[in-house]
Image (spheres, rainbow, N blue to C red):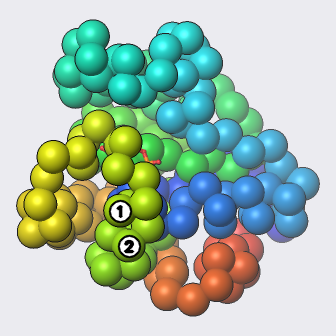
Amino acid sequence: MTPEHPIILCGFTSSGKTTIGKLLSEQLGLPFYDTDQMLIEHYKMTIPEIFAEGGESLFRDYEHEIARQVCGLGPSVVSTGGGMLTFDRNGEILAKSGTIFYIDRPFEDCYRNLALHPERPLFKNHTKEEIENTYLTRRGLYKKYAKYNIPNTGEPQDAAEKICALL
Ligand code: S3P
């Protein structure tokens, strides 16, 4: 069944949100949005440029504006940045805008992937242990706003199918 509101994917960085989201959008014939990409296009700045100009707090303000824009999207698949749901003001808006799915991937798998993209400003200069602590804290916040928990331990297609079965 095609949902009337956005299917919103949340989860830690490198958990597979974008890959799974693109598969879902193809299979359901819905447009795909990525909140980081929306933010970059809206503000015409890259994420490292935003962090360089105003630090994390400016990035979070911009990200909040993008959360508000998700409300107006209509039927679609939306992948959110890893920090989006860790702010109640975004979680509350997004939970009302669509159905949130938590892409639940084990830390080691996320970390392996993250290590290939060291440019992400929030994780740049942090030890593995610090990143794991962030992962553990965020898990509770993702679960707070997600309607469904989608384990992602195998192929992205398996996770996409689990989501389709819940629509
Ligand atoms: C962030 C995750 C990134 C991006 C920004 C901050 C975070 O998105 O929004 O660098 O706080 O975890 P991805 O989850 O797509 O990497």
* Image region (quadrant) for ligand 1: top left
5 vs 20: above or below: above
- The residue where tag 1 is placed is 115
Residue extending furthest bottom? 154
Note whether ligand 1 is within 8 Å of mark 2. no
- The residue where tag 2 is placed is 112
Q: Which of 162 and 41 is in front in this view?
A: 41
Q: Which kind of residue does numbered mark 2 sit on?
A: Arg
94 vs 166: above or below: above
19 sits to left or right of 117: right
> Which residue appears at 28% of the width and 22% of the height?
51
Disc 1 is placed on an element classified as loop
165 sits to left or right of 143: right
Q: Which kind of residue does numbered mark 1 sit on?
A: Ala
38 sits to left or right of 10: right
**In the rendered structure, are the residues bearing label 1 and label 2 in contact, judged by CB atoms less than 8 Å apart?**
yes
118 sits to left or right of 32: left
Q: Nearer the viewer, residue 161 or 100?
A: 161
Quarter of the image for the C terminus: give it: bottom right
Give the image location of residue 102, x and y in percent: 45, 66
Quarter of the image for the N terminus: give it: bottom right
Note whether ligand 1 is within 8 Å of mark 1. no
Disc 2 is placed on an element classified as helix
Give the image location of residue 65, x and y in percent: 43, 19
Query: How crowded is the residue under tag 2: few (<14 C-alpha within 10 Å), some, or many (20+)?
Result: few
Give the image location of residue 70, x and y in percent: 57, 32
> Which residue appears at 73% of the width and 36% of the height?
74
